[in-house]
Image (cartoon, rainbow, N blue to C red):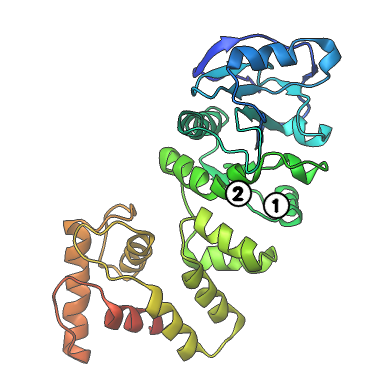
């Protein structure tokens, strides 16, 4: 394939430390912490000597500027795993020198924009982060879709703190912001729950993944309970408790889910955009009008707990 490089680059110093042309298509991004609040020029000087035996594709300075040290067409030496580096774009991000190795706001925002740019130019419409290393790498080999870019971490391949707890803690937010830029397709609540079951995503990893994919943990857990056969009435009660009301101008994943259901039932033909506009409100009222005849529900355009309960039990 034809490789390109990011237009966000403002400084280039090509490092001789690379393995030449990649042997795998780009389908991963591996962020790193520099452990130093440096500029892209300083980082380039670190990677320039052959004695260093290290490099990255890109670097982000404390001021948010982007440097390039190894073109995307070539494998950098960055994550202690040749197999990972063959398929990953590696990014070194200027950080504090002590735990949790925080990065500055300018670098943070640039990291989001750079990851979105990498995804776009490599034909990916969604960035995926799975907190558990075993689950993530299994997903990469057995379930990753062709339109997805996967986040991997240096610490999965070596005894290191990299990319630092600050970046790890903020990856769900970074991923959500990247996906908002990409505007890519997202899993439905049922698909999210089934994914958690299929790939054994449990505990804190399940909570992190739910947030990264734009869901609440409680909603995902209730849906998992339904799939696994927990008493349906109790599982639906749990789910109703965490489904917020939807009304005009509401923006949320609940709106997206409701729009899908309204479209399935023939009440809605608009965009699945997670925004309750006039067309969505009209569809809610149309459904409520039918329900009023049978259940005596109000026709007010507000999809609250009683409506969610009826929908989820239908």
- The spot of residue 58 in percent (x, y) is 62, 22
Q: Are marks 1 and 2 in contact (CB under 8 Å)?
A: yes
Which residue is located at x 51 percent, y 67 percent?
Answer: 217
Q: Using residue 28 as the reference point, say whether residue 174 is left or right of it.
A: left
- The spot of residue 90 in percent (x, y) is 67, 29
Q: Looking at the rendered structure, which numbered label has been put on residue 129?
A: 2
**Upstream in the sequence, badge 1 or badge 2?**
2
Query: The residue tagged with tag 1: helix, strand or loop?
Result: helix
Say few, some or many: other residues with alpha carbon within 10 Å of mark 2 (under 14 / 14 to 19 / 20 or more).
Answer: many
Query: The residue tagged with tag 2: helix, strand or loop?
Result: loop
Q: Nearer the viewer, residue 202 or 74?
A: 202
Residue 51 lies, with reference to residue 234, above or below; the image says above
Which residue is located at x 75 percent, y 23 percent?
Answer: 76
Q: How many marks?
A: 2
Q: Looking at the rendered structure, which numbered label has been put on residue 136?
A: 1
- The spot of residue 7 in percent (x, y) is 50, 17
Say which quarter of the image contains residue 269: bottom left
Say which quarter of the image contains residue 290: bottom left
Which residue is located at x 61 percent, y 80 percent?
Answer: 228
Q: Using residue 301 as the reference point, say whether residue 227 is left or right of it.
A: right
Say few, some or many: other residues with alpha carbon within 10 Å of mark 1 (under 14 / 14 to 19 / 20 or more).
Answer: many
């Amino acid at each position: 394939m034809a490789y390109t490089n990011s237009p966000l680059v403002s400084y280039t110093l090509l490092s001789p430390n690379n393995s030449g042309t990649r042997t795998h298509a780009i389908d991963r991004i591996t962020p790193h912490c520099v452990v130093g609040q440096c500029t892209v020029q300083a980082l380039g000087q670190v990677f320039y000597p052959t004695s260093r035996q290290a490099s990255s594709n890109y670097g982000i300075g404390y001021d948010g500027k982007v440097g390039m040290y190894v073109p995307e067409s070539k494998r950098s030496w960055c994550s202690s795993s040749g197999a990972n580096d063959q398929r990953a774009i590696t990014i070194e991000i200027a950080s504090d020198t002590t735990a949790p190795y925080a990065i500055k706001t300018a670098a943070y925002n640039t990291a989001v924009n750079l990851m979105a740019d990498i995804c776009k130019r490599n034909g990916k419409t969604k960035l995926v982060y799975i907190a558990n290393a075993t689950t993530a790498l299994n997903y990469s080999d057995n379930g990753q879709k062709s339109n997805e870019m996967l986040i991997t971490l240096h610490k999965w391949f070596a005894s290191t703190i990299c990319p630092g707890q600050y970046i790890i803690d903020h990856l769900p937010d970074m991923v959500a912001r990247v996906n908002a830029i990409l505007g890519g397709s997202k899993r439905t609540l049922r698909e999210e729950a089934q994914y958690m079951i299929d790939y054994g995503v449990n505990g804190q990893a399940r909570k992190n993944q739910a947030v990264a994919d734009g869901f609440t943990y409680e909603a995902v857990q209730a849906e998992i309970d339904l799939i696994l056969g927990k008493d349906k009435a109790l599982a639906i009660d749990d789910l109703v408790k965490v489904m917020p009301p939807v009304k005009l101008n509401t923006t949320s994943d609940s709106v997206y889910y409701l729009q899908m259901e309204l479209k399935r039932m023939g009440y809605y033909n608009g965009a699945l955009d997670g925004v309750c506009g006039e067309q969505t409100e009209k569809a809610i009222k149309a459904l409520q009008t039918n329900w009023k005849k049978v259940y005596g529900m109000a026709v007010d355009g507000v999809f609250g707990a009683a409506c969610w309960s009826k929908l989820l039990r239908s």
